[in-house]
Structures are given as structure tokens and as C-alpha cells.
Image (cartoon, coloured by chain):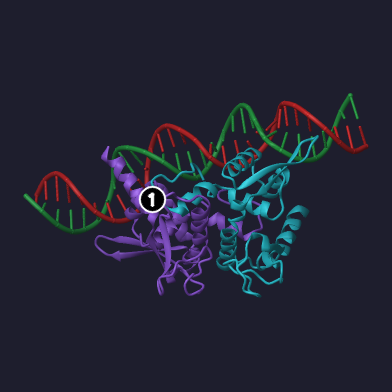
Chain colours: A cyan, B purple, C red, D green
Amino acid sequence: MLRNDYPGQVCSIARSLEVVGERWSLLIVRDVMNGRRRFDELQKGLGVARNVLSSRLARLIEEDILERRAYQESPQRFEYLLTEKGLGLWPALVALLAWGDRYSPDPNGPPMLIVHKECGGAVSDRGICEECGKVLHARDARPVPGPGLKGAIDNAEALAAR
Amino acid sequence: MLRNDYPGQVCSIARSLEVVGERWSLLIVRDVMNGRRRFDELQKGLGVARNVLSSRLARLIEEDILERRAYQESPQRFEYLLTEKGLGLWPALVALLAWGDRYSPDPNGPPMLIVHKECGGAVSDRGICEECGKVLHARDARPVPGPGLKGAIDNAEALAAR
DNA sequence: CCGAGTTAGTTGCTTGACGCAACCCAGTGT
DNA sequence: ACACTGGGTTGCGTCAAGCAACTAACTCGG
């Protein structure tokens, strides 16, 4: 994605996409949500160029979606945490995850599942617990590896073994 | 080969974004959902370059999100319609709309609201009717102009009057 | 019959964001 | 002392996005 303004658009979807519609932005938010908080961790996990990661993190901080905080002095080391606004993206991520799983399914099954921390129930495309029916938020749920992940790991090992 | 893919990502969010994460893609889907079906209509409404619109439409058709159909012969004229897969993006769009309205509010109020066709109730960020509590789908809801739209129109008129 | 308008694109040129690799710097382990 | 790690920045080439002009098939008004 190139420039990030959609001139003349009077629509909250367009405004949202100005902020998180750039390539990598939503994936960075997803990774931070899943506990990846450090620069190198994010860079290796995503395979994004370091300069691009750097500029995306700066933009996400500017937009108050992430917060940068030192987790140790000497040497200074930083971690990135989600703000409330950042956590507010959870329903959109869940919807995209569910859409991908439903309409472009992995033959091995979904690579990642989201479960309700409290009761262990599966989370629907609307971010609702299918077990207890509660409308959940980012902190109420956690990701667990799904059956599709195994296939991907086998695949990666086969590639590495060549 | 390295075109729009997020290499090494085993995640349905990443796979979803490969398809709809490109600039304009989601806005095109939104417009088609709101009844804009023709090339020129989309081009004027979005302000996107014609060649970019052309290539996005081709990609969305290739991914089975849109369908191209002639609505008249002689001269041949085409319209673009959403498939089931395309309609399946509705919850994600609703979540992004709600996120924009909540965390980057327009001073005049939201420019667009979504209401449940059946009972007229407002639709929540999860695509649930706040009136009757039903979990809705794309066809159950319609957009209505919100208070923020008036401000934008006034603004546009002020610009035009100069 | 001629020219203007509508719809649906395609072509060609230019710019700028992204990917890649290399480099930098401070501190730390060996 | 030297390499390694974490957290970036710099420089360069490529490819996608923006802009404008052009094509093409058909219709309509004078």
C-alpha cells in the first residue's frame, strides 16, 4: 500500500484503513496481541524489512495504537505494547481470521484458533464465545495453535531438509 | 513470485490480507455492498485511478469475491456483484467502521450508520442488532447517512464556493 | 450524417513506497 | 579482544500507484 490517505472519502472504514490499511500494520498488531513485543522478534516472525518495521512501529505509536516502553536500562531495550485503541482492533482481526478460515480453508484445518480464556470455548467470527455466549474483548481470549499449524511445520521441515 | 504474499506466514489473517489487504480492495467491496456496481460509479466515488480500479476488480473476481455480469447487451455494459465470499467480509467491515467511529471520532458524529433492515435497530461493532439482539449478515443490514455526513457536505460546498 | 456524450476500459510515463543488504552503535558474554 | 545481540538507520533498485491521454462501441440530438 502506498500513500495512506483516501482523499474525499467520508467514511470511517476509509479513515480506519488510512491508519491500519498499510501493508504489515495489522499483522504487527496481531503479533503484538499474541505476545511478540520486541523489535527483533517481530522482524523475524513477520519477515518484514527492518526499515519498514521501524517506520510502521513509529506510525502505530503516533496513532496511539502501540506504546513503546523500556523493559530494561543498560543496555536500553524496548518493548511495544497495545493501547486500548490497539486492543480495539481485536474484533476486526477476529473477523478477518474467520473469513480466511471459512472461504480459503487450509486443507489441514485452521492454523490458529481463538478460545475464551475463562471457559475454553471457541470464539466465533463476531468475537463471541460459542460456549457461554459472552461478547468477548481482546483480553478475554487467547490464540491456540490449530491443526493447520502442524501441516505447515512439516512442510517447513521438508523444505529445510532438502 | 514475491508479489502480494506474506512469505512464511501461517495465519489466516495474513492469508486474508493477501487478498483484501491491498489499497482500495476493501473500499471497493464496501462500495459494491452499498449498491455501487458500475465501473464509472466506483471510479468517481472512490477517486481511484482507472487502471488501478481495473486491476483490483480483476483480482477480486479472480479471488471469487466479486462477479462480473452484463446488465445489458448492445452496448455491452457490466456490473459487479458480490459473491457469498464477498458478502462474508461484512463483519470485518463493520468492525473497522466501529473502530474508526470509536477511536477517531468525527466531531460531527459518525458519517455513516448501519441499521437492521427488519427492525431499524442500530448495528453494533460485532454486527449484532442492538434492538432485537440478532446476529446479522450483510443482507440483513443497510447503511444510512449519519450526522457526520452533513458536516462533510457543508465542508465540500464551502470548498466549491470559493 | 456529424459531433458530443456515456460506459468501460488500456497504454504510457513518472513518482515514491517497499524489499534487501549493509552498516552503525551500545552493551555483554567469553 | 573479539564476536554477538538488540535496535535500529542508510542507500539503492524495483515494482506498484497516480495521472493523463487514448481506444472502442454504442446512443442521441440537431
C1 vs B118, nearest the viewer? B118
**Residue at 43% from the left image edge and 59% from the top image edge:** B30
Label 1 Cα crowd, 10 Å radius (few <14 / some 14-19 / many 20+): some
Residue at 50% in and 63% down: B89
In the rendered image, which quarter is residue A148 located in? bottom right
Residue B1 visible in the displayed image = no
Q: Residue at x 45, y 60 (%)?
A: B61
Secondary structure under tag 1 reads helix
| Residue B116 makes an appearance in the image | yes
Task: Tell me which residue sits at (76%, 53%) in the image.
Answer: A160
The one of B90 and B64 positioned closer to us in this rendering: B90
* Amino acid beneath label 1: Leu
Residue B29 percent coordinates (x, y) = 44, 59
Q: Position of residue A99 (x, y in %)?
A: 56, 64
Q: Is residue C2 above or below residue B84?
A: above
Q: Which residue is mark 1?
A: B46
Task: Judge from the rendering whether residue C18 lies leftward or rightward of residue B10; answer left or right.
Answer: left
Q: Position of residue B157 (x, y in %)?
A: 29, 45
Read off the chain for label 1: B
Count of picture labels = 1
Question: Which quadrant holds residue A104?
Answer: bottom right
Classify B42 as above or below B90.
above
Answer above or below: position of D28 versus B48. Answer: below
Q: Position of residue B28 (x, y in %)?
A: 42, 56
